[in-house]
């Protein structure tokens, strides 16, 4: 729905979630842009009360905040996931919601393989041991304190057959890996091109997650699934923290049920001090990064460009990337 030619009030609730190098293109229609680095839940309602358009990356916009936002016509989510927005309320109020798509098709797979290679070749423990003087102590040209494995010939198991999973598969093929995709959990048969979930868990040397977080995928991997991982795989999660039972992961890693884990996500974010993953930081086969797989400068700029493009399309009466 196109808006009037009056000056628009556009409110960006968490501009600080995009890096400082990212340039936000200007809108062609007269507008006032009010940007906040961050917005606490208690301030959302007041900040969007007079907005025509709201931009949010991670700040939730729920029914109680929407109740007084009588002018609001568009929520432009600066991310792919839209679980932060009360979509049924927006649909009932004729508030459009758009999201970002396809911008992370290089950055997330590259981060996935950065984690995978670092773990497979024990890069961090070797680096740390050199810094601690172990090389001099060894007294020879190398030492073998940590395992090193090739990727070639191993099986890369991918959960999620979308664009990200597909790019990860191409990178895996370039390394000479065998690729399998997981079928749906709980279904004994899988559609063509997919491996039944139980067989998938047993066959993979590496498992990487690229599926959305939904009620069906929450805690997709837990104690029962780790027990089925016959090949003691590496587990890579650049998707959502809630896809994995974090307490069960900690037990599986310490018990040697998996060879290692590289995570870019936790539940919630930032993690609480007692989060099980934070208790693994001293292990040589665990890496945790702060949800930055998506955040290459190229990807963030592409996101910003698409974000403003979504708003421009809505203003022109030709909305795109609508989720509500």
Image: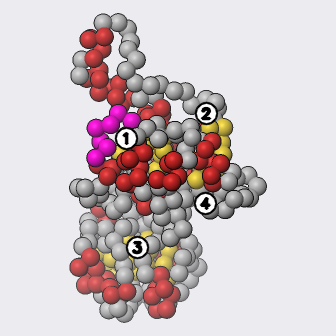
> Which label was assigned to residue 185?
4
Image-quadrant location for residue 77: bottom left
Q: Is residue 80 above or below residue 173?
A: below
Q: Are marks 1 and 2 in contact (CB under 8 Å)?
A: no
Tell us which disc is closer to us: 1 or 2.
1
Q: Residues within 10 Å of mark 1 (few under 14, many from 20)?
A: some
Question: How far apart are labels 3 and 1 at the CA level?
Answer: 34 Å
The reply to whether dot 2 and dot 3 touch (C-beta < 8 Å) is no
Residue topped by disc 1: 254
Does residue 105 sit above or below 27 in this rendering? Answer: above
For label 1, the SS is helix
Secondary structure mainly formed by the magenta segment: loop
Q: Earlier in the sequence, mark 1 or mark 4?
A: 4
- Position of 72 relative to 118 (above/below): below
| Residue 295 on image: x %, y % | 41, 51
Q: Earlier in the sequence, mark 3 or mark 4?
A: 3
Q: Give the mark, 3 or 1, whose residue is nearer the N terminus.
A: 3
- Which of the two labelled residues, at mark 4 and mark 2, occupies the earlier sequence position? 2
Colouring: secondary structure
- Earlier residue among tags 1 and 2: 2
Q: Residues within 10 Å of mark 3 (few under 14, many from 20)?
A: some
* Circle 2 or circle 3, nearest the eye: 2
Q: CA distance from mark 1 to mark 4?
A: 25 Å
Residues drawn in magenta:
279-285
Q: For residue 170: magenta?
A: no
Labelled disc at residue 154: 2
Mark number for residue 84?
Answer: 3
Whether residue 138 sits left or right of residue 323 in the image: it is: left
Give how far across and how far down residue 115 sits, in percent: 44, 40
Is 83 or 301 nearer to us in this picture?
Answer: 83
Q: Which residue occupies 54% across, 59% down? A: 211
């Amino acid at each position: 729905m196109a808006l009037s030619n009056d000056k628009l009030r556009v409110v960006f609730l968490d501009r600080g979630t995009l890096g400082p190098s990212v340039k936000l293109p200007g809108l062609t229609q007269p507008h006032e842009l009010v940007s906040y680095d961050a917005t606490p839940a208690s301030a959302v309602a007041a900040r969007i009360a007079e907005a025509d358009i709201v931009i949010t990356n991670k700040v939730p916009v729920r029914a109680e905040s929407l109740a007084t936002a009588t002018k609001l016509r568009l929520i432009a989510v600066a991310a792919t996931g839209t679980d932060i927005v009360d979509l049924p309320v927006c649909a009932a109020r004729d508030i459009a919601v758009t999201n970002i798509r396809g911008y992370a098709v290089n950055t997330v797979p590259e981060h996935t393989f950065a984690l995978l290679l670092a773990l497979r070749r024990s890069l961090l423990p070797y680096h740390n041991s050199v810094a601690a003087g172990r090389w001099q102590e060894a007294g020879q040209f190398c030492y073998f304190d940590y395992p090193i494995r090739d990727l070639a010939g191993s099986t890369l198991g991918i959960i999620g057959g979308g664009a990200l999973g597909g790019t990860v598969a191409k990178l895996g093929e370039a390394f000479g890996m065998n690729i399998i995709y997981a079928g749906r959990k709980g279904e004994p048969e899988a559609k063509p091109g997919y491996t039944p979930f139980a067989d998938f868990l047993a066959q993979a040397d590496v498992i990487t997650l690229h599926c959305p977080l939904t009620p069906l995928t929450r805690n997709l991997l837990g104690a029962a699934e780790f027990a089925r991982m016959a090949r003691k795989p590496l587990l890579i999660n650049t998707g959502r923290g809630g896809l994995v039972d974090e307490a069960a992961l900690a037990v599986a890693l310490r018990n040697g049920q998996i060879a290692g884990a590289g995570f870019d996500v936790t539940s919630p974010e930032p993690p609480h001090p007692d989060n099980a993953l934070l208790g693994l930081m001293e292990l040589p086969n665990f890496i945790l990064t702060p949800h930055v797989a998506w955040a290459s400068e190229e990807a963030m700029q592409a996101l910003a460009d698409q974000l403003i493009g979504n708003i421009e399309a809505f203003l022109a009466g030709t909305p795109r990337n609508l989720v509500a």
